[in-house]
Amino acid sequence: MRHHTQPIAFIIALGLVAACSRHDDANVTADLKGAGHDVDSAAAHVAHDQDVRAAEAQFRAAGRDAGRDFRKAAAEARAAARALAADTRHAAHDVTHSNPRDQRDSSS
């Protein structure tokens, strides 16, 4: 008879472990849901905080100012690059279209 009690005790032990495991899973799930609600509540509070909104407006304004400054600097660099390109084209044209006879005539 003793041989039949060991498997029964083993099955009961497995059942208790499974029951505890389900209970722990339920507690973990409840804890995670609670934490999620806490995070949502904190995020909503931050989203409606006037100091946060003021800081957001300041960041937006700083971004617009920086964008305007970068566009101005880019326009100035583009103008300088175009002027340099024009000067280079003129210098290259002068070099490639110089007439050796004109130089000889002027040296005489």
Image (cartoon, rainbow, N blue to C red):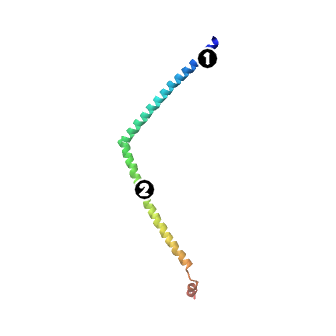
Q: Position of residue 95 (x, y in %)?
A: 56, 77
Q: Is 48 located above or below residue 70 in the figure?
A: above
Name the residue nearer the viewer: 5 or 24: 5
Lower sequence index among marks 1 and 2: 1
Q: Residue furthest bottom?
A: 108
**Mark carried by residue 7:** 1
Q: Quadrant of the N terminus?
A: top right
- Density class for disc 2 (Cα within 10 Å; few <14, some 14-19, many ≥20) is few
Q: Which residue is mark 2?
A: 67
72 on left or right of 10: left
Q: Amino acid at mark 2?
A: Gly
Q: Amino acid at mark 1?
A: Pro
Task: Please tell me in which quadrant of the rendered image residue 40 appears.
Answer: top left
Q: Residue at x 56, y 87 (%)?
A: 105
Name the residue nearer the viewer: 78 or 105: 78
Viewer-side label of 1, 2? 1
